Each structure stands twice: as structure tokens, then as C-alpha cells.
């Protein structure tokens, strides 16, 4: 069994080297970048997405419910739970996508692990916006 796993890893790595002529100048970093970027990006994307959307939704829900004590009592917990769930799931997905795409394009960078910027300055809903970095900024 160990022999099959070893041969599979060697075959995958050699196919990655031979089928990636665009990233030939980056060499092994283009192969190792996604391997490191996917788990790191997934975990950090989950945490950053959950925290950023929980704080955003808590504030917006309490404001939408009247911005008073009753609105705060109802809106903050509902917004926190909703923001944590939606931001966490989409942040996990965006972190994995960042780990793969940016792990190949910019191997082992802070962006490939979803670690660039402030903790709450993260937009987990901005999938595939790699051309314009300003689109990903929270406004």
C-alpha cells in the first residue's frame, strides 16, 4: 500500500512539472504552493470570513431593527450567528480557491494563504476577483 501511495505522489508531481510550462520558472514552488495554500487558506479564510461577516451583520441587523436597545438585543445575536455561518462557509471556499489559484500564480505568498490585510478587512463573497485587488476591499 505504501508503494502505491509513493508511486502516486511521484506520478502526480512529475505530471505537474511536465504539464505546467507557464509556471516553469517558478519550479517546485508552483507545485508546493497549492499544497500549503489550500489548508492554510481554508482555515484562515474560514476564520476571517466568519469574523468579518459576523461583525458586519451584527451591526447591520441591529441598525435595521431600529438601532435601540430592543434592536440590539434581537439584531446582534441573529446577525452574529448568520454572519458567522455564511461568512465562515464562503470564507472556507474562497480560502481554498485562493490557495489553489494564487498558490500556483504566487506560490507561498500571504495572499495564497488568505493572510494578507487586516483580520476584518476580508470579503469572502468576492470569488475570482484576482485582476482588481481593490474590488476585494471591504467598503
Image (spheres, rainbow, N blue to C red):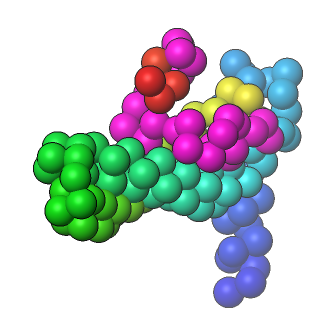
Report the residue that reaches farthest toward the bottom. Answer: 1
Rendered view: 53 above or below 8: above
Q: In this view, does 19 lie to the left or right of 71?
A: right
Say which residue appears at 55% left-offset and 52% top-offset: 48
Residue 128, image x, y percentages:
44, 28
Q: Is residue 110 magenta?
A: yes
Report the residue that reaches farthest toward the left. Answer: 65
**Near-viewer residue (90 or 32):** 90
Rendered view: 135 above or below 61: above
Report the predominant secondary structure element of the magenta stretch.
loop
Q: In this view, does 5 lie to the left or right of 98?
A: right
Please report the bounds of the magenta region as a residue range: 108-134
Residue 59, image x, y percentages:
34, 47
Instruction: State the quadrant of the N terminus.
Output: bottom right
Rendered view: 2 above or below 51: below
Examine the rendering and report whether any part of residue 27 can be seen. Answer: yes
Say which residue appears at 85% left-offset and 21% top-offset: 25
Q: In which quarter of the image is residue 24?
A: top right
**Near-viewer residue (104 or 7):** 104
Say which residue appears at 75% left-offset and 39% top-offset: 110
Say which residue appears at 70% left-offset and 19% top-offset: 22
Amino acid at each position: 500500500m505504501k508503494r502505491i501511495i509513493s508511486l502516486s505522489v511521484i506520478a502526480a508531481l512529475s505530471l505537474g512539472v511536465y504539464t505546467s510550462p507557464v509556471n516553469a520558472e517558478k519550479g517546485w514552488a508552483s507545485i508546493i504552493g497549492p499544497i500549503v495554500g489550500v489548508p492554510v487558506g481554508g482555515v484562515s479564510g474560514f476564520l476571517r470570513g466568519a469574523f468579518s461577516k459576523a461583525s458586519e451583520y451584527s451591526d447591520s441587523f441591529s441598525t435595521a431593527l431600529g438601532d435601540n436597545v430592543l434592536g440590539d438585543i434581537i439584531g446582534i445575536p441573529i446577525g452574529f450567528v448568520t454572519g458567522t455561518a455564511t461568512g465562515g462557509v464562503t470564507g472556507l471556499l474562497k480560502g481554498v480557491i485562493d490557495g489553489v489559484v494564487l498558490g500556483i500564480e504566487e506560490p507561498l505568498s500571504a495572499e495564497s494563504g488568505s493572510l494578507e490585510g487586516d483580520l476584518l478587512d476580508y470579503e469572502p463573497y468576492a470569488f475570482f476577483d484576482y485582476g482588481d485587488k481593490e474590488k476585494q476591499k471591504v467598503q
